[in-house]
């Protein structure tokens, strides 16, 4: 097992799946471009964040396809390719641009299997960067997983570490349904132990990253790291259980409820906006399924219901902080 960055883990997952399965192809803007816009040229970066570096050189233009700046074309081509037996991995660069191609996602790819009576599969992945903290401002830094999670027919994946990124992406590529794979841009440089060989992480199975007895903290994406750090800081005074759902659709409510029944308390931490978000969904389900186990009112910490600010000082205030998480945990336990 080697130490790899989040970026390297994604690259390795794509490389290994493309070596294993010749039907896996990549589509996106500037995914093969190099200096001066020359595909595969010297200095080729493999997209804006360098995630696909080296894949064009290994697999060529037939499998690493540089597209025009047209999200509708990228996702539309991926949906059509999936219907013909290929396994396309389409990149939107910034997932915020999904609005341009939303019809191809929610009204086409997500519904093909249902509308065609189960006679076809749509094994496609749509990758893209999400999240604030990179100074990308309102149109390039949103946390969009609640929107995709609302749509039947889509699977929604939100990895929180390099290990999760590789295993979940390989699972996504092998899945028979369309998968939205959301990569928090601030995590690209984070590092962790990742197996060198291919492996999969099943969808809909949450992961307990810290075991505890006093409170359950359900965290999504980058917030898993924040909550792990807070849980470690609070020991031995407080025993905090941190749970990473890994996927928001399917959502592992069974494990969440089991954890809350054990601890009796619940906090949900999510970078997404508060209305109709994962915090409300988790708390609502727990209130129904584990009401008798609750020893305190569940609470959630989210970003405010505003666009992401461009100013660095405001962006820092926008993102849920470790201090806020710690203070809220103390308040809930204190009753």
Image: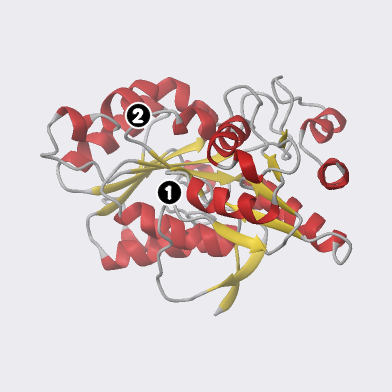
Residue 32: mark:
1
Q: Give the left or right position of residue 16, taking residue 117 as reference.
A: right
- Residue drawn at x 10%, y 39% as measured from the top left: 119
- On the image, the x and y values in percent for residue 204 come to 43, 51
Seen from the viewer's position, the closer of residues 301 and 86 is 301
Rendered view: 207 above or below 30 = below
Q: Which label's residue is closer to the chain start, 2 or 1?
A: 1
Q: Is 145 left or right of 294, judged from the image as shown?
A: left
Depth order, front residue of 142/250 = 250
Percent position of residue 277, x then y: 59, 29
Q: Could you say where residue 248 lies in the image, as x and y percent from the top left?
A: 49, 42
Q: Is residue 15 visible?
A: yes
Q: Quadrant of the N terminus?
A: bottom right
Q: Quadrant of residue 281?
A: top right
Left/right of residue 214 with respect to residue 324 in the rendered view: left
Q: For marks 2 and 1, give the one nearer the viewer.
A: 2
Q: Position of residue 177 (x, y in %)?
A: 29, 43
Residue 105's tag is 2
**In the image, what residue occupies the spot 58% across and 62% down?**
162
Q: Residue at x 22, y 42 (%)?
A: 82
Q: Residue at x 19, y 43 (%)?
A: 121
Where disc 2 sits, the SS reads helix
Q: Outermost residue, front direction?
A: 292
267 or 48, which lies in front? 267
How crowded pointer 2 is (Cα within 10 Å; few <14, some 14-19, many 20+) is rated as many
Tell me, yes or no, if residue 50 can be seen here: no
Q: Quadrant of residue 90?
A: top left
Marks 2 and 1, how far apart at CA? 24 Å
Instruction: Give the left or right position of residue 296, taking residue 249 as reference.
Output: right
Looking at the picture, the colour scheme in use is secondary structure
Would you place residue 169 above or below residue 281 in this image?
below
Indicate the secondary structure of the residue bearing disc 1.
loop
């Amino acid at each position: 097992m080697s130490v790899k960055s989040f970026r390297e883990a994604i690259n390795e997952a794509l490389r290994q799946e493309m070596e294993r399965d010749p039907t896996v192809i990549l589509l996106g803007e500037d995914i093969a471009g190099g200096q001066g816009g020359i595909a595969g040229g010297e200095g080729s970066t493999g997209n804006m964040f360098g995630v696909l570096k080296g894949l064009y050189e290994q697999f060529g233009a037939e499998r690493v396809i540089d597209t025009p700046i047209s999200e509708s074309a990228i996702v539309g081509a991926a949906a059509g390719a999936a219907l013909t037996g290929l396994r396309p991995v389409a990149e939107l660069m910034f997932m915020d641009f999904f609005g341009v191609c939303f019809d191809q996602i929610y009204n086409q790819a997500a519904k093909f299997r249902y509308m065609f009576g189960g006679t076809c599969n749509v094994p496609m992945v749509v990758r893209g960067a999400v999240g604030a903290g990179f100074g990308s401002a309102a149109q390039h830094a949103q946390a969009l997983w609640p929107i995709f999670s609302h749509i039947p027919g889509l699977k929604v994946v939100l990895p929180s570490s390099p290990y999760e990124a590789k295993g979940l992406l390989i699972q996504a590529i092998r899945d028979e349904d369309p998968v939205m794979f959301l990569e928090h841009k601030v995590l690209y440089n984070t590092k962790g132990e990742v197996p060198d060989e291919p492996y999969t992480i099943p969808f809909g199975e949450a992961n307990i990253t810290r075991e505890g007895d006093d409170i359950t903290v359900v965290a999504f994406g980058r917030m898993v790291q924040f909550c792990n750090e807070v849980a470690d800081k609070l020991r031995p005074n407080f025993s905090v259980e941190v749970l990473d759902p890994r996927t928001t659709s399917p959502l592992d409510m069974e494990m969440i409820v089991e954890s809350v029944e054990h601890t009796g308390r619940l906090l949900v931490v999510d970078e997404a906006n508060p209305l109709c978000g994962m915090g409300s969904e988790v708390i609502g389900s727990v209130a129904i399924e584990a009401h008798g186990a609750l020893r305190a009112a569940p609470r959630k910490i989210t970003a405010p219901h505003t666009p992401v600010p461009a100013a660095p000082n405001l962006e820092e205030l926008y993102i849920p902080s470790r201090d806020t998480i710690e203070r809220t945990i103390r308040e809930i336990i204190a009753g």
